[in-house]
Each structure stands twice: as structure tokens, then as C-alpha cells.
Image (spheres, grey):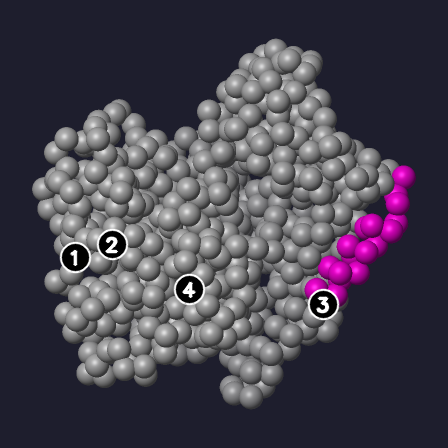
């Protein structure tokens, strides 16, 4: 083993290479993990770096540590409402879904690799889970904006399905090495993993929030460290009790993140950085561990297994588990495609190595190959698939950024930055005319590169960043003043209720169903009809077209400019034939 | 068009038990069946027609309200019912909120205007926030019936 100094040098170089490679990843749209793995493989014993690294125990340790921090960070950023809306389908996918995926893939693996059934199932279990790190990066960080409930389901699923895969893997290894009999012992193991994991996670989370609030540390830098410590404590406690540490650390993150402890922004920044370091080091270590030449040996079988996993196992699992939860067909197809594999399978693949199972090397190489294929094929094509399935929704308003006061006490004030655009009610208003609640101060207006000290007569313009000091309790009211008027108005203060209709349905269908005349070819879609009538380069939200008896509003626009959803308002009979519309006949039916 | 023109008294349900979209539609259609508004052999076909309409876009119109509706040849006049679910049902609404208040409507194909007018009446009346809130808080079919009557008498949103 090289000296510590050399180790530090190598780590620095590898981290830098990882960071540089993330630039390529953004440009090419390939998930970063592929590049990190490639850096590791190139630096490894068969690559140009020539680093000898075949320490499965160390790789396993790095992987476990990194995963726990990544899951903790993911938990910190998961609001309760996400879980409330998504836990049912996500829970099904995270348990039964993993089991179904593992069984089907396992059968295929046993067949292609001429393994025993148990060995095949072991391989299936190892690749059974969807990777949280990759899904978080793709859905939160980059490019793909999909319907909220769909994104939330996928995030919660990927955050909570590792325990199931880990349990299956550990259980099968114990069965294969003769430690635990098939059957009751296995079930017992599973229940205690879930129960103690959940118990430890929530308990440490609740206690931790209380401690973070009470301790009043003198140094800001210690708060993030304390949060990390709580994460480790949770993981360790769960593991010591025989529960799943990964589930525990994710739950602890969720509990702490939703209580907004002191110096929360610092905590988030710290763990964001920690999660990145972990991702880079973990994937590079796993890349170092692999032997590209051995990967080629298993290529044909691994490709076949990947194909079964991607095109059969995951879709079957998704359709069986999520079908009862009212997802549209194309949403189920998309969920099937987000069966992204990442670090968990490769880390799990070191388990059989450590246990000294006979087929361990082949399992490791195959799993490594399957993860690469999944990350490349599914990860790369994900944005395109989302567009093809017409699931992309317009990116939300850049959320107002909270600049937290770096106070070590819990001060009852927030500094919030709002971005004012055309839809915002504040645009064009003078500061003194804004309907702000008492005790709210507009601190600063940033216009392009200029800083404008606000006075009562200062006019706020579209494109301004307005920095406001407020008490957290009045935040919703201030949000209403600055944020897009449209969305808030349409949900809270409707002028008329709208029936949502998909943009992809045809004029004929709507005409037949409501006995209307939309004056368009019946085979045309509402999307085409609306864009035709609006006749503009790019349709915008809230654009509307008025017909004899109804008015259609643009409600969701895809990235490519097609209309995904329209809102139908039925006009009152009295005004249903507007004067400017000379062609309209008097509407059928009696008035109110 | 008034609520009393199409909402069938005997079919109003103040405490829906269902927890899923499909089940709640079944429950509402069954309420019409039990009060004799629709024929038993048409039940499944009517439910299928309503679900088919839902595929065009959820009739969950936001703010905890859904108006599942369809045309069906087996009815000779507009029939409708109102249901309230205390726990709320995930109805795939665009705003993601659970739906507590349901108006279910079946109209005959040969009276084209009625269908639209009834929907317009519902969406106009529901603009009144207190009407909406009172309906969701109703504990009995009689309460609901009375609120609808008050709405018909123009005590809520101006007609």
C-alpha cells in the first residue's frame, strides 16, 4: 500500500478528474456516474493510471458510507408533502416491485449464466433496486421536468427501495452459505430490517431535531457536523439493532429536513458537497475495482440480462405495482424506463465477494456491466423518452431563494429573494402600493447588475430580484404578492371552474361528447386547433380561444411548445354568443 | 338550469366510503341505481362510459371538487347525484388535491343543451367558496339537499 501522502495526492487527482468529467456529462447528457466509473477504470490496474486496487472490504466500506450520506442528503431535501402524496405507489414499488424485478431478472440470470436458481436470484436481487443518487440527480438537478406526483413517486421509491434489495441480497447470501434456512428465518430478517430501521430512523430524527434546537452552539460550522453525526448515529443504531441502516438514515434526514433546524441552509450546503464527494469517490473506487478485460468476458450474458431487466422485469414490476394508483399508461411506461441502476448494485456485488461465494467474481463483473448498460441506455435517453411520452411540463418559476440569516439562534425572520416576472402581481407596481402585511420590509431591489435601494415610489419591474425581510408566518401572503399571479389566481380565486382536457384528444371527441361546434377538422387534436387559432410563435400559459359555448385556456405547455393540457370553461348561456363573433348561432338549450 | 332539475334526492350521499377514483364512481353510480334512476343492467356500461370520459382529462376540477359525467342512451332525462367524502379521494386532479365533493351527471344523448347547461350551473355555483365549503362539511343528505335548494334560490353566487 502506498504512503498516506501518495494516497492524498491520488485522491486529489481523482476528485479533480471526476469534477472535470462532470462537465462532459452535462454537455453530453450522460449520467455523471458513467464518467466517474470510467475515470476509475482508466486509473485502475488495466488502465493508464495503473493503480492496483483490489480491496473489496475497503470498497464495500466506502460504498456503504457514501450511500448513507447520499441517502441522508436526499432525505433532508424531501418535504413531507412529497411523501404524503407518493408513499402508497412508492411503497409498493420499493417492496413488491423490487421483489418482482429481482425474481424475473434472477430467472434470466440463472438461465444465461447457467447458475443455480439461488445464485441467479442473488444476482437479480443485487440489481433489483433503483438508484437514489442517479434518480435525484436526473429529476432534481437536470433537465427533466415531469408531473409532480410522478416525480415524487420515483424519488420516494428510489430513496426507500435499497433496504429491500439489501435484505434480499444479504438473505440469499446467508441461504447460499448455509447460515439461514430458506423460509421463516428469512421473513424474520426482513421484518426486523424494516421495523428497527424505521424505528431508529424516526427516533434519532426526532431527538436530533430537539437537540439541534436546544444546544445553542457557538460556532456555525458545528451544526452541519452535528447533523452528519446524527445521520451516522441513526445508521449505526439501526444496524446494531438488526435493522436497515439505509432506511434509518433516509428517515432521519426526512425528519430533520422538515423541521428546519437552526442554520439549515448551512446544513444543506454541507451535505450537498458531502454527497458529491461521496458519489465521486464511491464510483471511482468501484471503477478501480473492476477489470475491464473481465467485463468483456461476461458481455454477451450481461447484455442479455440487461435487456431482460430493462424491457421485461422492471416494466412488469411497475405495471403490477403502480397500476392501482391511477397513473396514465405513458406514465407507467416512463416509470419503467426510470429503473436506473447505480452504486447500490455494485456495492452489493461486493457482498458475495466478501462472503467468499464461488460465483462471486462472475456476479460482480455481470452486475458492473448491467449497471453501465442501464446508466448509459436509460440515463442517457431519459429526457428524450420523457419528451416522446409527452410527460414534460414547463419548468416551474425559479423558486424564491431563501437567504438564511446566519444566526446561531433561531431568529424569527427570513430574508427571501423573489424573482419578479410578467405574471407576478408586483410587476409594474410602486413599492408603496404593494399589499404587504405589516412588519414586512423590502430590503433591496436588484435590477440586472444594479442595486436599487427601494423607496416608496420605486417601481418594481419585470425581471427584478426583490429581497424581502419577513417573519415566516406571513410568508404565504408575501408569496402571493410576488409570485406568479396566474397559478395562485386559478386555484384560489377562480373566475370560473375549468375542466382539464388533454391536449392530445381530438376535436371530434370533444364535439361529440359535449355537442359543440369548434369549427375545426374533427381529427385535429386540441393542441393543434389551439395553436392554429392562437397563431403565434410560442403559445403561453393562460392564452385562450373562445368558441360558441366554451372557452379553452392553455394550461400546460411542453418543452417543444405543444399544448399538453387545456382548461375548458363553459360559458353562461347569456354571454355564449359574443357580439364580436358574427358567425355564432344562438346556443341550444334553455338559459338558467 | 337548477340543481333540483337534475340532482336526485334519494341518491345524495353524505358519507362516501370509497378511497379510489374507480371505487367512488362505482359508489355514486350505485346510489343512482338504488334510488331507481338507472337500470341495473346498464350500471356497468354507465361506469365504463364515465371512466372513458376521465381518460380525456380528469374531471377533478381543483379545490377538492370533481364532476364526473357522461352521456348515456339508457337515461331519458338528466340524472345526477352529489356525494361528499370526509377523507377525500385521490382523483388525479391537476392541482393534486384530494377530492371531497363529487357531482356525478348522466345525460341523455338527445337533449344536447342540457348536458352543458348543467355543467355550467355546477361550475358557476361552485365559484362561491362558502357554498363549496358548506357542502364539504355536510353530514347528511338532507343538509346537502337544503344547500342545493338555497343555491337554486340564488342565495350563493349570483346567477
Q: Is residue A210 magenta?
A: yes
Q: Residues within 10 Å of mark 2 (few under 14, many from 20)?
A: many
Task: Judge whether residue B143 can be spotted in this image.
Answer: yes
Per the rendering, the mark at residue B112 is 1
Q: Characterize the magenta stretch by its predominant secondary structure.
A: helix
The foreground one among A242 and A88 is A88
Per the rendering, the mark at residue B116 is 2
Q: Residue at x 78, y 33 (%)?
A: A406
| Secondary element type, mark 1 | helix
Q: Which residue is mark 3?
A: A200
Q: Residue at x 50, y 64 (%)?
A: B136
- In this view, A398 is above or below A114: above
Q: Nearer the viewer, mark 4 or mark 3?
A: 4
Please state the horizontal and vertical placement of residue A183, each as a whole percent of the image.
52, 87
Q: CA distance from mark 1 to mark 4?
A: 25 Å
- In this view, A178 is above or below A348: below
Q: Which residue is mark 4?
A: B149
Q: Which residues are magenta?
A: A202-218
Q: Residues within 10 Å of mark 4 (few under 14, many from 20)?
A: some
Q: Are marks 1 and 2 on the same chain?
A: yes
Task: Judge whether residue A297 can be spotted in this image.
Answer: no
Quarter holding residue B82: bottom left
Task: Using residue A375 as the reference point, say whether residue A14 is left or right of it.
Answer: right
Q: Are marks 3 and 1 on the same chain?
A: no
Task: Using residue A346 as the reference point, say whether residue B159 is left or right of it.
Answer: left
Q: Residue at x 22, y 58 (%)?
A: B114
Q: CA distance from mark 4 to mark 3?
A: 55 Å
Q: Nearer the viewer, mark 2 or mark 3?
A: 2
The answer to whether the residues at label 1 and label 2 have Cβ atoms under 8 Å apart is yes
Q: Residue at x 42, y 54 (%)?
A: B154
Amino acid at each position: 500500500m502506498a504512503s498516506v501522502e501518495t494516497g492524498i495526492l491520488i485522491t486529489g487527482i481523482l476528485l479533480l478528474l471526476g469534477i472535470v468529467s462532470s462537465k462532459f456529462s452535462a454537455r453530453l447528457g450522460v449520467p455523471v456516474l458513467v464518467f466517474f466509473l470510467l475515470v476509475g477504470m482508466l486509473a485502475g490496474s488495466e488502465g493508464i493510471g495503473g493503480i492496483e486496487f483490489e480491496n473489496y472490504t475497503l470498497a464495500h466500506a466506502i460504498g456503504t458510507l457514501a450511500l448513507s450520506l447520499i441517502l441522508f442528503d436526499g432525505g433532508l431535501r424531501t418535504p413531507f408533502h412529497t411523501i404524503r402524496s407518493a408513499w402508497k405507489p412508492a411503497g409498493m414499488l420499493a417492496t413488491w416491485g423490487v421483489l418482482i424485478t429481482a425474481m424475473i431478472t434472477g430467472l434470466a440470470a440463472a438461465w444465461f449464466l447457467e447458475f443455480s436458481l439461488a445464485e441467479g436470484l442473488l444476482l437479480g436481487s443485487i440489481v433489483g433496486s433503483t438508484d437514489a443518487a442517479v434518480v435525484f440527480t436526473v429529476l432534481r438537478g437536470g433537465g427533466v421536468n415531469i408531473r409532480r406526483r410522478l416525480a415524487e413517486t420515483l424519488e420516494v421509491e428510489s430513496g426507500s427501495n435499497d433496504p429491500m434489495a439489501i435484505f434480499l441480497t444479504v438473505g440469499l447470501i446467508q441461504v447460499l452459505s448455509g447460515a439461514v434456512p430458506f423460509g421463516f428465518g428469512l421473513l424474520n430478517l426482513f421484518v426486523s430490517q424494516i421495523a428497527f430501521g424505521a424505528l431508529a430512523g424516526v427516533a434519532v430524527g426526532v431527538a436530533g431535531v430537539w437537540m439541534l434546537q436546544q444546544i445553542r452552539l457557538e460556532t456555525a460550522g458545528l451544526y452541519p457536523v452535528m447533523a452528519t453525526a446524527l445521520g451516522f448515529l441513526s445508521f449505526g443504531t439501526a444496524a446494531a439493532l438488526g435493522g436497515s441502516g439505509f432506511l434509518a438514515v433516509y428517515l432521519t434526514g426526512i425528519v430533520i429536513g422538515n423541521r428546519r433546524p437552526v442554520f439549515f441552509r448551512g446544513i444543506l450546503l454541507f451535505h450537498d458537497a458531502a454527497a458529491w464527494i461521496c458519489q465521486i469517490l464511491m464510483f471511482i473506487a468501484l471503477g478501480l475495482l473492476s477489470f475491464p478485460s473481465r467485463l468483456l468476458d461476461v458481455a454477451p450474458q450481461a447484455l442479455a440480462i440487461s435487456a431482460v431487466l430493462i424491457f421485461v422485469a422492471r416494466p412488469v414490476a411497475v405495471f403490477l405495482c403502480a397500476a392501482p394508483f391511477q397513473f396514465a399508461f405513458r406514465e407507467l411506461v416512463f416509470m419503467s424506463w426510470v429503473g436506473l441502476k447505480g452504486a447500490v448494485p455494485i456495492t452489493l456485488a461486493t457482498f458475495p465477494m466478501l462472503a467468499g461465494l464461488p460465483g462471486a467474481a462472475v456476479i460482480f463483473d455481470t452486475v458492473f456491466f448491467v449497471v453501465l448498460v442501464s446508466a448509459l441506455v436509460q440515463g442517457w435517453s431519459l429526457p428524450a423518452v420523457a419528451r416522446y411520452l409527452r410527460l414534460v411540463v414547463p419548468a416551474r418559476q425559479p423558486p424564491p431563494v431563501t437567504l438564511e440569516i446566519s444566526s446561531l439562534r433561531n431568529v424569527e425572520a427570513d430574508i427571501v429573494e423573489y424573482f419578479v416576472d410578467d405574471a407576478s402581481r408586483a410587476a409594474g407596481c410602486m413599492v408603496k402600493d404593494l399589499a404587504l402585511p405589516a412588519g414586512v420590509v423590502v430590503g433591496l431591489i436588484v435590477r440586472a447588475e444594479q442595486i436599487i435601494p427601494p423607496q416608496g415610489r420605486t417601481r418594481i419591474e419585470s425581471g427584478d430580484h426583490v429581497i424581502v425581510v419577513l417573519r415566516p408566518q406571513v410568508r404565504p401572503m408575501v408569496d402571493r404578492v410576488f409570485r406568479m399571479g396566474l397559478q395562485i389566481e386559478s386555484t384560489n380565486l377562480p373566475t370560473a371552474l375549468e375542466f382539464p382536457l388533454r391536449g392530445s384528444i381530438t376535436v371530434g371527441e370533444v364535439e361529440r361528447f359535449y355537442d359543440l361546434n369548434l369549427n375545426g377538422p374533427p381529427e385535429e387534436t386540441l393542441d393543434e386547433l389551439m395553436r392554429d387559432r392562437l397563431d403565434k410563435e410560442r403559445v403561453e400559459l393562460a392564452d385562450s380561444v373562445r368558441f360558441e359555448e366554451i372557452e379553452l385556456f392553455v394550461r400546460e405547455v411542453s418543452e417543444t411548445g405543444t399544448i399538453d393540457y387545456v382548461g375548458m370553461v363553459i360559458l353562461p348561456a347569456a354571454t355564449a354568443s359574443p357580439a364580436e363573433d358574427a358567425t355564432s348561432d344562438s346556443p341550444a338549450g334553455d338559459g338558467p | 338550469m337548477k340543481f333540483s332539475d337534475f340532482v336526485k334526492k334519494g341518491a345524495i350521499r353524505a358519507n362516501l366510503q370509497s378511497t379510489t377514483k374507480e371505487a367512488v364512481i362505482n359508489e355514486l353510480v350505485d346510489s343512482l341505481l338504488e334510488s331507481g334512476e338507472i337500470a341495473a343492467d346498464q350500471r356497468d356500461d354507465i361506469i365504463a362510459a364515465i371512466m372513458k370520459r376521465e381518460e380525456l382529462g380528469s374531471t377533478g376540477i381543483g379545490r377538492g371538487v370533481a364532476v364526473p359525467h357522461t352521456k348515456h342512451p339508457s337515461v331519458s332525462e338528466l340524472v345526477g347525484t352529489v356525494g361528499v367524502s370526509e377523507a377525500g379521494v385521490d382523483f388525479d386532479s391537476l392541482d393534486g388535491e384530494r377530492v371531497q365533493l363529487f357531482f356525478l351527471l348522466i345525460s341523455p344523448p338527445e337533449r344536447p343543451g342540457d348536458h352543458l347547461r348543467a355543467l355550467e350551473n355546477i361550475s358557476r355555483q361552485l365559484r362561491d367558496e362558502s357554498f363549496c365549503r358548506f357542502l364539504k362539511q355536510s353530514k347528511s343528505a338532507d343538509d346537502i339537499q337544503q344547500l342545493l335548494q338555497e343555491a337554486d334560490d340564488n342565495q350563493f353566487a349570483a346567477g
